[in-house]
Image (spheres, rainbow, N blue to C red):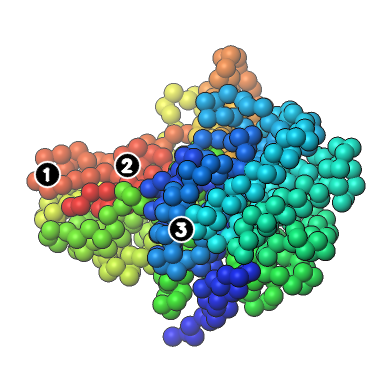
Amino acid sequence: MGKMPDFRLLLSPLRVGNVLLKNRIVSTGHHTYLADEVPGEKLIAYHRARAQGGVGLIILEVSGVHPTSRFSGNYLMATDKSIIPHYARVVDACHEFGATVFGQLFHPGKEIKTSSDGTQVVAYAPSSIPTDRFHIVPRVMSRALIEDIIAGYARAAELLVQAGLQGIEIVASHGYLPAQFLSEYSNQRNDEYGGNFENRLYFLRQVLGVVRAAVGDAVLGLRMTSDEYDPDGIRGKEVLQICQTLESHPGSAPDYYSLVHGSSATAGGAVYIAPPMGIDHRDALQTATLLKQQIHKPVLVTGRINQPQTAEQILSQGQADFCGMTRALICDPELPLKILNHQPDHIRACIGCNQACIGHANKGVGISCIQHPESGRELETRANCKPERIKRILVAGGGAAGMKAAVEGARHGHNVTLYEQSNRLGGLVNLAQQLPGRAEFGGLITNLVSELERHDVEICLNQTLDGDTIRRKEPDQVVLATGSVSHIPDRLEIQDIPYFSDQFILENKVNPGRHVVIADWRCDWSGMGLAEKLAMDGHQVTLCVTGALAGEAMPLYSRYYHQGRLDRLGVVIKPWLKLFGADNAVVYFQHCLNNDPVLVEDVDSLIICDSRQPFCLLENELSDAQFDVVAVGDCLAPRTAEEAILEGWSVFNRECH
């Protein structure tokens, strides 16, 4: 047996201002879309789960400080004293387990999309510089409005401290209002709030000053972006200058600094707000290390820190004092307790897919996790449901849906056997992880296999089931998770040109020739991933999609990331094209909007990413069964890993059996 990893620093207390954190694991501020105006039952349950899991510090999501800061629905506001008892309930729920709670104060400036009724609101900013990403032309802030917003920060901070929060963090990151004042590009004022460096810093200094006066001995923190990934944006050198200048003005110096990456202002910068798999966590550390050395105050760093080993290394190398592990805690709220109980190998590691966390938030719906559906659904979860009797459960299919159903059935005390017709578990995940930048997706299977082993699920590989075999086993319940199969429509007329399904290309070593056309009906990971893989291998690739853009069905920031990579690789992307047929070296498409024919010529092979079809023969064979039969995942309807795992989980968690 190997030596147990040492997490001495990560689990050690840290003093920040006048507050002692019990450990250095932080759930940083992130918009959950689980609340509206004030914290309610969903948000309280969400944070309570992380506090119960042992996290040291919870920083609540952004709270608006002024009516002009309202940027979406399901958004917390801190402008009226009526909020106090609602925030106090969050604090009480978290304090029960020894977690410290800070608040986060926010104004987006011009980074506003729509109002709660779908109309475009008037956005306010230091100058009338349009936003590249949301195409907003903001109204210049008057001096009176600036002063009212600054007073709003003070009022909001006072209210949150009255509610029992022990610290306040000012959001000056990601291109939001304070960063717009700091930026030489966004701030072209000629009064005391613009012009030279000191004037551009004046707004933030005033905000920090009035908040410090309002909160008294409570902790004051500042969140900054160390690199906006924009030629016109703020970079690390300027961040260091800002922080050093703040330190020379004691009345506006914070107690700690929180460093992140990215910016809402551009699509390229937005990728780094919640960096997807493929982006190294070390990208955020260089500025943090320099800041820690120069300022000598606690530095919080975040950005794809998904494993305790990574966090411990950051701390031991002096790169930060505490670590934001937000997505890791969404994926496994018990991560801190598992470290404390010497069970780091039991941690369900975040894979950075962004599908149900930031992916949900980008859609304006409550966040969750594809691996841990309980996140965001704490009020729906019956994790401690004890069955009236122990059942014999048979699960047919060892992909993500079947594995999750088997884990949950066993966790609830049932006897579970999982059957898989191939020689390995994982289903389509085994193919997905072969795509560029997607290797970590295989961690989903690694995590589920570990849970199957811990819960003593019997696994039978290389075994195909039929109705008669299942009946002979006399189960109490059967979960059908037999997945889906790739499909090439019969209507297609293809002659004298090699053509393959996307699944076949990934399963077999095939040389598709010089010029490859990918006909992507799904507009998801598969078409973009194959285009990237083939282009990296030196092929000329034309990606034809039925939607408005490649990767239309992907999480927003992940789509941005891979679209940028495809452009750099020279992949030609053609939107709104539906495959009609092919012959010789020509592929024929029909334009989805005007029905015109479109030809792609001089083609060596065609790869077809069309709809997948459910594979569920057992459902008909068991239609007259005397035991419960439930279908989950792709055999119910082909979708994504998120729905597959959610449905596998739901069999035993949304209703007691």
Mark 1 or 3: in front is: 3
Task: Look at 11% across and 44% down and name the residue there.
Answer: 625
Q: Is residue 422 above or below residue 144?
A: below
Mark 2 or 3: in front is: 3
Question: Label 1 neighbourhood size at 10 Å, few (<14), some (14-19), many (20+)?
Answer: some
* Disc 3 residue type (three-letter): Val
Task: Look at 42% across and 27% down and name the residue there.
Answer: 490
Residue that numbered label 1 is attached to: 625
Q: Is residue 49 above or below residue 319?
A: above
Residue 444 x %, y %: 45, 58
Viewer can see residue 75: yes
Q: Which mark is residue 91?
A: 3
Q: State which quarter of the image contains the N terminus.
A: bottom left
Residue that numbered label 2 is attached to: 635
Mark 1 vs 3, N-terminal side: 3
Mark 2 vs 3, N-terminal side: 3
Give the residue at the far left of this rendering: 626
Quadrant in the rendering for residue 554: top right
624 with respect to 156 (left or right): left
* Disc 1 residue type (three-letter): Ala
